[in-house]
Image (tube, rainbow, N blue to C red):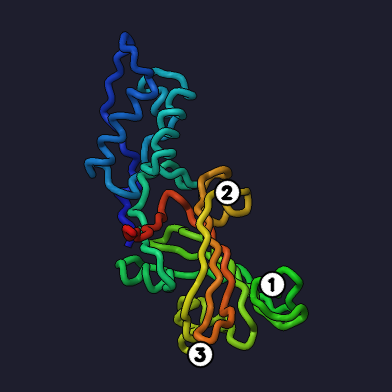
């Protein structure tokens, strides 16, 4: 159930010292940061918009825009088209492993759902054949899904899978990919994963409900079965304000 109180804009009690050498935008961003970090402003809470904030504090709109952007850059606020500027929801904090994101989210207590954006059976081109270690012209399935947590878009997941093990569209709408593969007796063994970052284009921003140019975490993964065959190749994009990864390190 959605807490409607989160939709009431939070009005921070901010006093500006115009004789101070501290820039005005910092005098706005710093108290907001303390309020959010202390938990005084709860995750998901709507924040007073930059126009209202500028009028109330009698400063320019670029000043309040920069102040709020400082918190966006720091991962404390997220701007979403149509819903305003809100305190960042609880982060998905995930340790690296050859596991299903959906299963990890459910185990962490998140409510999840998956929207299949497209599901296409096709013949592998040279690039796809190289990624799946199959022949050009072999039948494959390409899938794009939008993963949600607690009614908020989290990531766009694109997977390429050999057609003979590919789950149906209906199955993928109800369960995670790796659970579907396990039900087909496909056993995962190893994987290679590359993590990167870039900014969202117009289509990605629209799907994730974020601003164009917002930070995205990118993950490319090739997963192998017990016999060394490629099970799937994935290219995933995550809203960087909600998702981070833990990599265990061991001393030599």
Q: Which mark is residue 35?
A: none
Q: Is residue 114 visible?
A: yes
In front: 94, or 192?
192
The quadrant of the image that shows the N terminus is bottom left
Q: Write down the residue under mark 2.
A: 200
Q: Write down the residue under mark 1.
A: 130
In front of the other: label 2 or label 1? 1
Number of residues whose C-alpha sits closer than 10 Å to that of mark 2, classed few (under 14), some (14–19) or many (20 or more) = many
Identify the element where label 2 is drawn: loop
Q: Which of pointers 2 and 1 lies earlier in the amino acid sequence?
A: 1
Number of residues whose C-alpha sits closer than 10 Å to that of mark 3, classed few (under 14), some (14–19) or many (20 or more) = few
Q: Write down the residue under mark 3.
A: 184
Query: Which x, y percent locates residue 184?
Result: 51, 90
Q: In this image, 89 relative to 144: left or right?
A: left
Query: Which x, y percent locates residue 19?
Result: 31, 8
Q: Which of pointers 3 and 2 lies earlier in the amino acid sequence?
A: 3
In front of the other: label 1 or label 3? 1
The residue that appears at 66% across and 77% down in the rendered structure is: 133
Query: Which x, y percent locates residue 229?
Result: 58, 82
């Amino acid at each position: 159930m959605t807490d409607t109180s989160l939709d009431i804009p939070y009005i921070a009690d901010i006093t500006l010292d115009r004789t101070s050498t501290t820039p005005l935008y910092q005098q706005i961003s710093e108290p907001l940061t303390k309020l959010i970090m202390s938990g005084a402003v709860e995750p998901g809470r709507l924040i007073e918009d930059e126009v209202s904030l500028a009028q109330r504090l009698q400063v320019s709109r670029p000043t309040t825009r920069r102040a709020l952007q400082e918190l966006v850059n720091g991962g404390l606020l997220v701007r979403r088209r149509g819903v305003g500027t809100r305190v960042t929801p609880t982060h998905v904090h995930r340790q690296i492993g050859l596991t299903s994101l959906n299963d990890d989210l459910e185990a962490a207590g998140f409510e999840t759902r998956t929207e299949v954006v497209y599901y296409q059976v096709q013949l592998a081109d040279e690039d796809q054949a190289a990624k799946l270690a199959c022949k050009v012209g072999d039948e494959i399935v390409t899938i794009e899904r939008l993963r949600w947590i607690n009614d908020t878009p989290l990531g766009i997941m694109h997977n390429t899978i050999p057609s003979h093990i590919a789950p149906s569209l209906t199955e993928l709408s109800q369960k995670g990919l790796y659970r579907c593969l396990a039900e087909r007796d496909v056993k995962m063994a190893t994987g290679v994963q590359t993590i990167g970052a870039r900014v969202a284009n117009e289509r990605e921003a629209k799907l994730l409900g974020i601003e164009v140019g917002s930070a995205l975490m990118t993950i490319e993964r090739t997963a192998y079965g017990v016999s060394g065959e490629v099970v799937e190749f994935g290219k995933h994009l995550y809203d960087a304000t909600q998702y981070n990864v833990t990599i265990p390190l061991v001393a030599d």
